[in-house]
Image (cartoon, grey):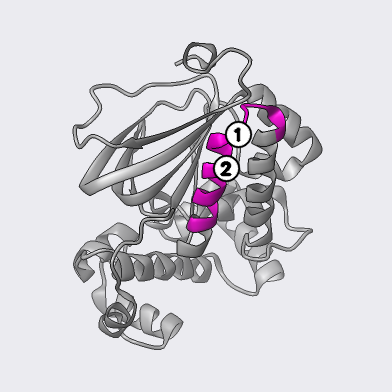
Amino acid sequence: MHYDKIVERDAAYAVARAALSHTRPKRLHTQDYHEILWLVNGKARLHLDDGRRVLTEGDLVFMPPDCAHGLQGSGEESHLVNVIVPTSEVVALAARHPIATRFFAARGSAPVIIHRDIRALSRLSSRAVTLESAPRSTLHLEAFLVPLLAELAQEARDLPPNLPDWLAKALIAADDPEVFRDGAAGLVAQCGMTHAHVARTMQAHFGMTPSDYINARRMAFAARQLAGTPDSLSEIATEIGLSNMAHFHRLFRKQFGMTMRQYRIKHQKSVIQPV
């Protein structure tokens, strides 16, 4: 897909909303632009060359150019918002704010997926409404992108300023179930370093092992599934890559101070559609 074929002439960006079809895409497609998309309701499958990712309400995806992909709705109606951003705008933004490259991945790379909680999702959707009604100028695009990037950078688990860039990118990627499902090995693979080097670096900066970090991400994901979906414990265990249910229960209780059943009763609520 080509930017100049789907975006109005001289427009710096495009915004669209869609209800995803439940039909599996017949083929994956690529594009010559960056795309930001997020689910405001429901679940979806993001199909990629190397498999698929399950997206839930609040998942924010930074899709790079030349990454073959397709989307499919799952379960109840799946609604998404997407913002199309030309590569030239990303390059210009990254020149002034290098941290943008942590989220806008290089051409042909895997997408970066970050979960937004209900408050952050509401802010994001509100900004999208403003962007949608604004002139399609670089000024208004940056008025949307800069606060989003600043918010993501600020809350990126308070990453130390001297953290190696390879580790910072790997930790962001580790929010993806496709990564943490493989445990510490999944994180180490994202780093491109030896396990021993990754472990030493994480111990120096965070005082924890790769396994400790990944298990925390797994439990955070499990908590979101408990609160926002009817998925069974065994289904959630499979999603996060834990086959030992007793170990799963121990990890969850250690992180949240209650059982998964107690957590679900306390936190489960109806899906809220952000305005």
Q: Residues within 10 Å of mark 2 (few under 14, many from 20)?
A: few
**Which residue is disc 1 drawn over?**
134
Q: Amino acid at mark 1?
A: Ala
Q: Is residue 20 shown above or below 88?
A: below
Q: Residue at x 28, y 37 (%)?
A: 20
Dominant secondary structure of the residues highlighted in magenta in the image: helix
Q: For the residue labelled by badge 2, is the local secondary structure a helix, a strand or a loop? A: helix
Along the line of sight, the residue nearer the viewer: 269 or 228: 269
Q: Where is residue 55 drawn, in percent x and y?
A: 35, 49
Q: Where is residue 56 drawn, in percent x and y?
A: 35, 53
Q: Quadrant of the N terminus?
A: top left
Query: Disc 1 versus disc 2: distance between alpha carbons?
Result: 6 Å
Q: Where is residue 199 drawn, in percent x and y?
A: 60, 64
Is residue 123 highlighted in magenta? yes
Residue 269, by quadrant, is bottom left
**Which residue is disc 2 drawn over?**
130
Q: Where is residue 18 drawn, in percent x and y?
A: 34, 35
Along the line of sight, the residue nearer the viewer: 91 or 193: 91
Q: Which span of residues is magenta-colored?
A: 122-139
Q: Residue at x 43, y 21 (%)?
A: 30
Residue 107, by quadrant, is top right
Along the line of sight, the residue nearer the viewer: 173 or 23: 23
Q: Residue at x 34, y 61 (%)?
A: 240
Q: Mark 2 and mark 1 in contact (Cβ < 8 Å)?
A: yes
Going by the image, does 56 lie left or right of 125?
left
Q: Amino acid at mark 2?
A: Thr
